[in-house]
Amino acid sequence: MIYLCDNDIVEKLAICDLLDDALEALGATLSDAYVIPTLRHRIGGKARVKAEKRLGKEAVERLLSFIDDAREITQSSSEDMLLLDDLVGIDAGEAVLLSATGFHPDFRLLTDDKRCLRSVATLPECQPIALRIQGRVLCFEQVLCRLINHFSFAHVCAKVVPVLNCDTALRAAFGSGMDSTEPNSVACLERYIAELRRLPFDLLSADS
């Protein structure tokens, strides 16, 4: 099993210091993780100063370490890229990610780009890709639920509460800070997941 990761979910997990934990909870190693090539350019080299202002210095350091051992996506279908190029809601990075799913028989797609998922699930042009990735997508909220199940609610809560402002779902689910309760937080995360499951194609994996 490999994990094709979009930039948003990797960055948010890094901000929360949950990158390594997420891999463990998924039963994966760094060599199983594939990232979009643009991630390195977003946070390294000349872009590092801006990235540190946007994500925080520690998150950038975690990301750079992660990228050193993860793999970059190198295969993409020109046919898929042409199809996705002008579609509303799908940016260039997500197009690379979606295109790469055609080259790996055993994958999960990790993404926090709900706009992209809605486009894939609803646009007629995307139906072949929707069928290909159906049941193989893990959204950010699913990964958080997996982390809670694998480690503990207290472990995840302690990680995310200091950085709640990085994500709307985190603010909603853990808005009470360290007074947040597992039933309320998990129920909130599950509402986000349920919303995606109601799309014309339920793209989400059932195993989280």
Image (spheres, rainbow, N blue to C red):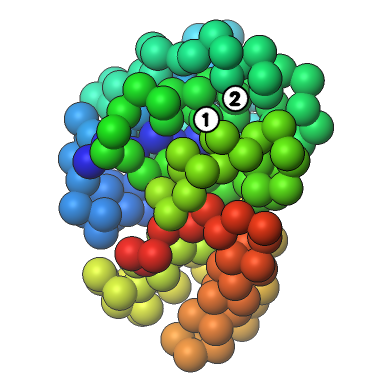
Kindly identify the residue that appears in the image at 25 percent across and 59 percent down: 25
In the image, residue 92 sits, relative to residue 126, either above or below, namely: above
Q: Secondary structure at mark 1?
A: helix
Q: Position of residue 177 (x, y in %)?
A: 57, 78
User: Can the viewer see residue 56?
Assistant: no
Instruction: Identify the image quadrant of the N terminus.
Output: top left
Q: Position of residue 128 (x, y in %)?
A: 56, 35
Q: In the rendered structure, which amino acid carries the disc numbered 2? A: Ala
Give the side of residue 55 with respect to residue 73, left or right.
Answer: right
Give the side of residue 73 with respect to residue 9, left or right.
Answer: left
Residue under pointer 2:
95
In the image, residue 35 sits, relative to residue 190, either above or below, namely: above
Q: How many marks?
A: 2
Q: For residue 75, which quarter of the picture?
A: top left
Q: Position of residue 14 (x, y in %)?
A: 44, 44
Kindly identify the residue that appears in the image at 51 percent across and 43 percent down: 131
Q: For residue 158, which quarter of the picture?
A: bottom left
Give the side of residue 129 with respect to residue 150, left or right.
Answer: right
Q: Which numbered dot is residue 98?
A: 1
Contact (Cβ within 8 Å) of mark 1 with mark 2:
yes
